[in-house]
Amino acid sequence: MRSLILAISLFAGSLAPLGSAPAAAQVANAAASDPLPADFHGKIQYFGNHSGEVVATVPGTPRRTDTKCPKREGGCPELIGGSFQAELEFDGDIVKGEYRGTGGMRPSSLIGRRNGANCRLFDTADGSVWNGRCDREAFVGTVRSVANAPEQIDLAFEAVGVNAVDFFEQERTRELIAAYERFGGIAFGEGAGESRLDALLRLNSYFVAEGQGYRPGTLRNVERESEKKNSPDYAVYGEYNTIDGARAWARARFDYNRFVCLETSIEPGTCRPIDPTPPPLETGGDFFAELGLPRLAPQGASETSGI
């Protein structure tokens, strides 16, 4: 539901109606947006609109409507336009995806590359070229047919990003959930000081910069610290090595054996709590399903033309 509310907000504030400034004019603004990271691995769903025309250049090419063309050799343009939905999957600079729309657009799939926020994709059905901006915020651009194609397409499309899933973050969350299942009982239980500090450092490694996490098996010189004898407030101090080999120290604070926070030499002076509950796994949901829209076409749609 959260993604649905965000999607509606973005859609209402960002989409221009058909007949306004063409989407192609907005492609020049691609550099102004924050592009996806170069190594982004994930998928983004988009929703918006499209408008343009299709011209049959080969005699006998089936028309999309019953409108008759007075030219014997064809060539009468057919206006198309309506809603547009797409899902693109990014693997670094490789992009593949699927799309569909109303008002004369047929479902098909795309494959190509991106450079920053700019995409150059090819329709797998008819080879038409999709040029434009593709990032977390929008999928905007134009479609042009290859030379001598039975149908010549001149199309502009504009859609906003309504759903995103980062596969890297998703996998990292899965690993963190697994770490909670293995070490959470020790970290937030009432075990011995050394084993608890080891478990807490293992969990804390997921919340610090890469390379600064705890290297398991290097914990040493562990001792209990307390201002007063038998005080319910105490700390467990220990030294260890980070993943990148640096020497470090940690101090876990407890109150009546209940974990309070963890301070390390990575951030001295800051004692950070660790949530005893693992984070939820964000799957991104399905915006199209939430709106009751048809599912996207399967890869390799059998249509003779994608538009």
Image (spheres, rainbow, N blue to C red):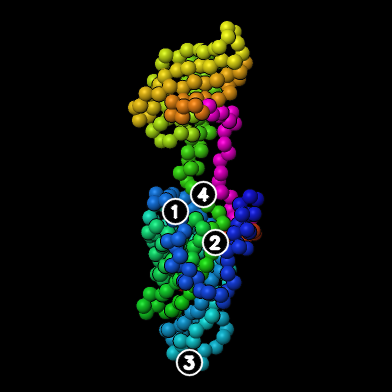
Mark 4 or 1: the one toward you: 1
| Callout 1 crowding tier (Cα within 10 Å): few <14, some 14–19, many ≥20 | some
- The residue that disc 2 covers is 160
Q: Which residue is identified by label 1?
A: 36
Residue 71, disc? 3
Secondary structure predominantly adopted by residues drawn in magenta: loop
- Could you say which quadrant of the image residue 293 lies in? bottom right
Asked whether 181 or 260 is in front, the reply is 260
Q: Please tell me which residue is depicted at 56% across the width and 75% down the height of the picture.
A: 20
Q: Distance between the residues labelled 3 and 2?
A: 39 Å
In primary-sequence order, the first of circles 3 and 4 is 3
For marks 2 and 1, the one nearer the N-term is 1
Callout 4: few (<14), some (14-19), or many (20+) C-alpha neighbours within 10 Å?
Answer: some
Image coordinates for residue 111, horizontal then vertical, percent: 41, 61
Q: Tell me: residue 166, above or below residue 273.
A: below
> How many C-alpha atoms fall within 10 Å of the one at disc 3: few (<14), some, or many (≥20)?
few
Compute the Cα span from label 4 to label 1: 12 Å
The kind of secondary structure element at disc 1 is loop
Discs 3, 4 touching: Cβ within 8 Å: no
Cα separation between marks 3 and 4: 49 Å
Q: How far apart are marks 2 and 1 (CA)?
A: 14 Å
Mark closer to the observer (2, 4): 2
* Residue 110 percent across, percent down from the top left: 44, 63
Direction from residue 65 to residue 149 in the image, left or right: left
Quadrant of residue 191 within the rendered picture? top right
Q: Which mark is residue 165?
A: 4
In percent of the image, x 45 and y 18: which residue is there? 238
Q: Determine whether 87 is above or below 155 in the image.
A: above
3 or 4: mark nearer the eye? 4
Residue 179, image x, y percentages = 50, 30
Magenta segment, which residues?
271-290
Question: Do the residues bearing badges 3 and 2 touch, measured as CB atoms within 8 Å?
Answer: no
